[in-house]
Image: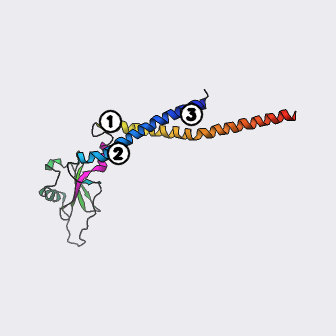
Amino acid sequence: MKAKQFFSKWSREIHRWVGLYFALVTLIYITEMLALPSVFSHGLPVVDGKPPVVEVQKSNDTKLLSQEVAKEKFIQQQPPGLDSEDEIDEITYFTANKVYRFSNSEKLFEWYVDAGTGEIIKYGFNVTDFLEFKGLLGWLYPWIHNTIEFSFLFFMATLGITGVYLFIYPFLIKLRSDKVTSTDNSSVQEVVSN
């Protein structure tokens, strides 16, 4: 078996099995995207992780709440999904939006509070971070997510290489057959001229 035929055969085999792997990973991801947010959100609405835009009065006497005061007002509202104050493990202030974000990074719950009034504007389960960090079976065991993600990159490179070879292979055969045909024609012309 010639080297080109050998590479062509194995490129097809590898390309087929890696393609099946990608189909399986895609199926897992789509299933998780549709089914799991409702399971892990505990009834909270879904948010995208982007802070809301809030209209703050532009007058000079508008005072923004400090982090401590905003947290007190937030807790007084008894936010849905929060059982105790200790569950808040991250507080972020968005200067451009004038909004505080209180979040629980383990459950991926977020509450956005207006920095001027202390009122909850938006809250919910961050499905974007869930799919990015706990998707691909990472919710089951994190090492599975890491393994799939690493192998995904490796197999993507393999799929690219085999795909390029499978695309170029017919042109290589045609180029070779054109050379053989031109060589045969020149040898026929030499025989005829002799």
| Disc nearer the start of the sequence (1/2) | 2
Please provide percent x and percent y for residue 139.
Answer: 27, 40
In the drawing, does residue 188 fall left or right of residue 137?
A: right
Q: Which residues are magenta?
A: 120-134
Out of 90 and 110, give the one closest to the viewer: 110
Task: Examine the rendered structure and indicate whether residue 85 appears above or below residue 142.
Answer: below
Graded by Cα atoms within 10 Å as few (under 14), some (14 to 19) or many (20 or more), the crowding at tag 3 reads some
At 20% across and 50% down in the image, what residue appears? 43
Task: Examine the rendered structure and indicate whether residue 139 appears above or below residue 118.
Answer: above
Which label belongs to residue 144?
Answer: 1
- Tell me the quarter of the image containing the C terminus: top right
Q: Specify whether residue 105 is in view.
A: no
Does 150 lie within the magenta span? no
Task: Examine the rendered structure and indicate whether residue 30 appears above or below residue 98.
Answer: above
Cα gap from disc 1 to disc 3, whole angstroms:
32 Å
Q: Which residue is mark 2?
A: 30
Q: Nearer the viewer, mark 1 or mark 2?
A: 2
Q: Which residue is mark 3?
A: 8
Please provide percent x and percent y for residue 2.
Answer: 61, 28
Cα gap from disc 2 to disc 3, whole angstroms:
32 Å
Indicate the colouring scheme.
rainbow
- Tell me the quarter of the image containing the N terminus: top right
